[in-house]
Amino acid sequence: MTRHYSVFSLFKEGLRGQKGWQQAWRSPQPKPRYDILIIGGGGHGLATAYYLAKTHNIRNIAIIEKGWLGGGNTGRNTTVVRSNYFFPESTALYEMALKLYEGLGRDLNYNIMLSQRGIITLAHSEAEMEMAARTVNAMQINGTDAELFGIDDVRRVLPLLNVSPQARYPVFGGVWQGRAGTARHDAVAWGYARAADRLGVDIIQSCEVEDFLIEGGRCRGVRTSRGEIRAERTGMVVAGHSSDLATKAGFRLPITSYSLQACVSEPIKPVLDTVVLSPGTGPYASQSDKGEMVVGGALDRVPSYGQRGNLPVLEEVVSGLLEMFPSFRQLRLMRQWAGIVDVTPDSSPILGESPLPGLFLNCGWGTGGFKAIPAGGTLLAHLLATGKHHDVSRPFDLDRFSRGRLIDEAAGSGIAH
Amino acid sequence: MQLFPCPFCGPRSESEFHFGGDAGNHRPEGFRTVTDGEWTAYLYERNNPRGAANEIWMHMTCGEIFRMERDTVHHRVAQSFALGEGDGHDGMAY
């Protein structure tokens, strides 16, 4: 059986008629008891299991997922990875993720198709250029790469962009992060799943949590659609559905769930080799390896658990894209979809033990969870293995809301919600 | 495009409305006696229900604030109410 992916195994299997490939992961029956149980088989949950097994050598782990692997926000995002945040705490977190992404393909033996093509966040006025300079300074001081682009730099990386002084939002320059880019979202989920499975992690799909097993004021596991599963420690990694499960566990979270939409055009030849975001016109866009324009924008303003998205926001996103790239106006949209994102008051994630002892949280990533998967997994694994915070996750504990120590990236880096 | 019922203007486009939070989330009274936990619950913790929701909304075009009962999964609106005195539960049905 061929387990390792390489050019040699590809060649070998080519000669054998592709008959020897091993299944990427098993589909085991749930055992009644595990050391650690993870709820949610998206990127963050799978990464948590992988790092628990690899870094902390804990092998008796299960991930339970009510649907299929990576079927939630992991498979619905626009695949952008970056670390262009404002506060030192955020840079430490997202830079940890970006550095891990840079070595992830080799680490997992799975091609995650990381493409560090750079991201440009446009500035549309002199005042926005001053804010862009402030952001660049903050990023450089916090130890990540950033460059202030003038209009000539923007023209160089975005030859199709409408930079006319008559544009509704004229372009003055922007913030450039060259190490940012895109990664294949499904491959990140599948790569972590395959690597975790090899280390003995049970990945159990179509297994929905019905209730928590609470004994002596402590979480002792869950009751699922496939029976009771007990565990010493449980991690809850369910993004937009965090409040729903928290209600079952007996507490509330500082989270509101919204739909975040994205869409792709028909595939065309390469015309855009970077990621572009315009705070003025609204959308951001990149071109996938298949040639589709991948476009996203702001949240729907209606709290929602319906994975669809509404028309007014889609209209804004598409009209903003055409304002930026008039040459895209004949492109046809191929697909549109939405994921349910978990938005916190300060647009920063929540990592730490929940009000129910024994249950640990990884949630609140809002519109930006995909880029943080390797860090979210590393940090929740650390929490679950040791019961204590990693230095990087400490500021993101739930207690920051009662202590008044918010990390307000909504204001700091201008997240559009 | 979804239509939301403003109790004063009738059915209007969703883009005219602004979400105002959970109905019944009252500001804790008593400056020195309110605990950190109560402030946190009031300021930050949200019901965020999957399914039936009871929410405060503002119709930005007329400026009125009202209560709306709707479903967060299929987006069906049950009813909207003008806010009455006090807790807003004695308002008129639209």
Image: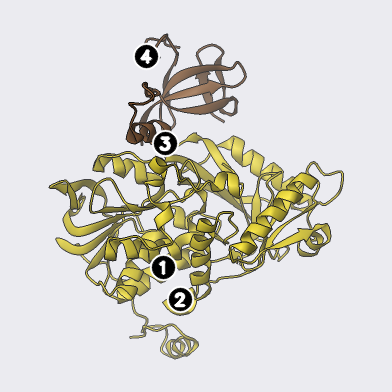
CB of mark 4 within 8 Å of CB of mark 2? no
Q: Quadrant of the N terminus of chain A?
A: bottom left
Q: Residue at x 47, y 57 (%)?
A: A75
Q: Which chain is yellow?
A: A
- Amino acid at dot 1: Trp
- Amino acid at dot 2: Tyr
CB of mark 1 within 8 Å of CB of mark 4? no
Q: Which residue is mark 4?
A: B89
Asked which secondary structure carries label 4, the reply is loop
- Amino acid at dot 3: Tyr
Q: Which mark is residue A190?
A: 1
Q: Quadrant of the C terminus of chain A?
A: top right
CB of mark 2 within 8 Å of CB of mark 1? yes
Instruction: Give me the chain letter of mark 2.
Output: A
Asked which secondary structure carries label 3, the reply is loop
Asked which secondary structure carries label 2, the reply is loop
Estimate the x, y position of residue B49 in percent, counting from the top left.
36, 34
- Depth check: give the residue in front, A206 or B44: B44
Q: Residue at x 61, y 65 (%)?
A: A180
Q: Color of chain B here?
A: brown
Q: Nearer the viewer, mark 1 or mark 3?
A: 3
Q: Residues within 10 Å of mark 2 (few under 14, many from 20)?
A: some
User: Going from the N terminus, do you reach mark 2 or mark 1 first?
Assistant: 2
Q: Residues within 10 Å of mark 3 (few under 14, many from 20)?
A: some
Q: Are marks 3 and 4 on the same chain?
A: yes
Instruction: Give me the chain letter of mark 3.
Output: B
Q: Which mark is residue B44?
A: 3
Estimate the x, y position of residue A259 in percent, counting from the top left.
49, 42
Q: Residues within 10 Å of mark 4 (few under 14, many from 20)?
A: some
Q: How far apart, in angstroms, are the residues tagged by discs 4 and 2?
A: 56 Å
- Depth check: give the residue in front, A57 or A86: A86
- Amino acid at dot 4: His
